[in-house]
Image (cartoon, rainbow, N blue to C red):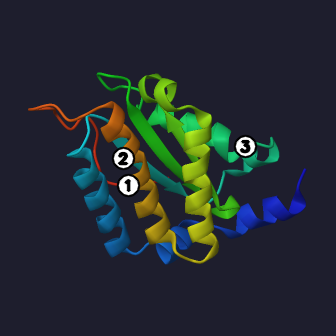
Amino acid sequence: MNFKRIMRHLSCGPVTVRRTFSPSAFKAIERAIGETETRHDGQIRFAVEAALDLSPLLAGQVARERAIEVFSQLRVWDTEHNNGVLIYLLLADRDVEIVADRGIHAKLGTETWEAICREMEAAFRNGQFEAGVLAGIHAVGDHLARHFPPRNGKPNEMPDRPVVL
């Protein structure tokens, strides 16, 4: 059991999210997702969570496991071409995880997603949370555009609005 991690999570709450992302930052993230999705046939979701609940925290849950849960809860897998991508940020750990559905993951692999996560985390270390998220959205969008070009009349299968958990 990591006592420092537990204390970090217990000290983070909804206020942490509001301090990190202003309403205008969330609007910019929503706009970026919408604009990016005009260039491809995929779906991008962004979710941020201040901290883990006590029970999963004490059980040792890591951000990757939580991201997979959120991917399922938000039904990011429920796209016509299996090309949904979740960008998940766990603020207490300053950890970014990208979970991609099988249609796009098969074309890119884990290394691509990890590289985007590391770039975002570098921006976060400099206090540039909005810029880091926007850069991640654009990087994911570039990969989706390369492998899933836009089609005429494609519906927006998922909301573009960021999710605060």
Q: Is residue 105 above or below residue 2?
A: above
Mark sitting earlier along the chain (3/2):
3
Residue at figure coordinates x 32%, y 22% from the top left: 81
Q: Residue furthest front?
A: 146
- Report if residue 163 is visible in the image: no
- C-alpha distance separating marks 1 and 3: 31 Å
Q: Amino acid at mark 2?
A: Asp
- C-alpha distance separating marks 3 and 2: 34 Å
Read off the residue under disc 1.
138
Residue 65 horizontal side relative to residue 116, left or right = right
- C-alpha distance separating marks 1 and 2: 6 Å
Q: Which type of secondary structure does the marked residue at label 3 adopt?
A: helix
Q: Which type of secondary structure does the marked residue at label 1 adopt?
A: helix
Instruction: Measuring from the top left, give residue 47's x and y in whole percent.
Output: 47, 51
Q: Amino acid at mark 1?
A: His
Residue at figure coordinates x 81%, y 47% from the top left: 58
Instruction: Measuring from the top left, give residue 40's x and y in whole percent.
Output: 26, 39
Q: Amino acid at mark 3?
A: Pro
Read off the residue under disc 2.
142
Depth-wise, is mark 3 or mark 2 nearer the camera?
Answer: 2
Residue at figure coordinates x 36%, y 25% from the top left: 78
Read off the residue under disc 3.
56
Mark sitting earlier along the chain (1/3):
3
* Label 3 with label 2: CB-CB less than 8 Å: no
* Label 1 with label 2: CB-CB less than 8 Å: yes
